[in-house]
Image (spheres, helix red, strand yellow):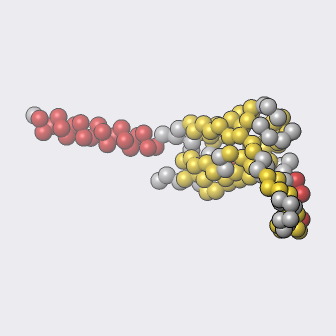
Amino acid sequence: MVRKIGMAAFVLLVIVLVTRAAVAETREFLMVTGEPSWEAKPGEAPVTDRNRGPVKKIERYVFHPGFLVVNRGDKVVLKIHDIKGDKHIVTIPAFNVPETQILRGEEKTISFVANKAGIFEIKCTNHLDSHKEGPMVAYLYVVDKK
């Protein structure tokens, strides 16, 4: 009798674990915009900034965090708070997420289902290259859990 109860408990545990692994979850992230910068001190040599050449000052717009991990099938909810920059226009082309404009001080929510595995860009179309203090990009790693 004890052995049958133990076996039934084991089977129930396996069913719960397998079922839970197959269920997609909602993954919510708070992201903020940042703007790290560097400026040469008096007498310090300039640095090369990609296609702009030698410069004495560099600024870049970034997302924090810059790398997110979810499982394929998860609902992804990004709450993006613009604390640096007048405006950011955020899109996630791989998941057909339309452009969302976020003004300084605002927080906007972007939701979608991560329905394919791989590494995908979350990008600001307002800051695409070094001439616009970019590229402003974060990466979404969608794990294919089989």
Residue 42 versus residue 63: which sits nearer the camera?
A: 42
Provide residue 31's location: percent of width, then percent of height.
68, 40
Provide residue 33's location: percent of width, then percent of height.
75, 42
Q: Residue furthest top?
A: 106
In the displayed structure image, the side of residue 56 where residue 113 appears, left or right: left
Instruction: Identify which residue is drawn at 54% across, 47% down.
Output: 71
Instruction: Identify which residue is drawn at 18% across, 38% down.
Output: 6
Q: Is residue 4 visible?
A: yes
Q: Residue furthest left?
A: 1
In the displayed structure image, the side of residue 47 where residue 6 appears, left or right: left
Instruction: Identify which residue is drawn at 61% across, 48% down.
Output: 68
* Location of residue 104 (image quadrant): top right
Provide residue 26's location: percent of width, then percent of height.
56, 36
Q: Is residue 99 visible?
A: no
Residue 54 versus residue 6: which sits nearer the camera?
A: 54
Q: Residue furthest front?
A: 43
* Location of residue 5 (image quadrant): top left
Residue 124, above or below 16: below
* Quadrant that contains the N terminus: top left
Residue 45, above or below 111: below
In the displayed structure image, the side of residue 104 where residue 109 appears, left or right: left
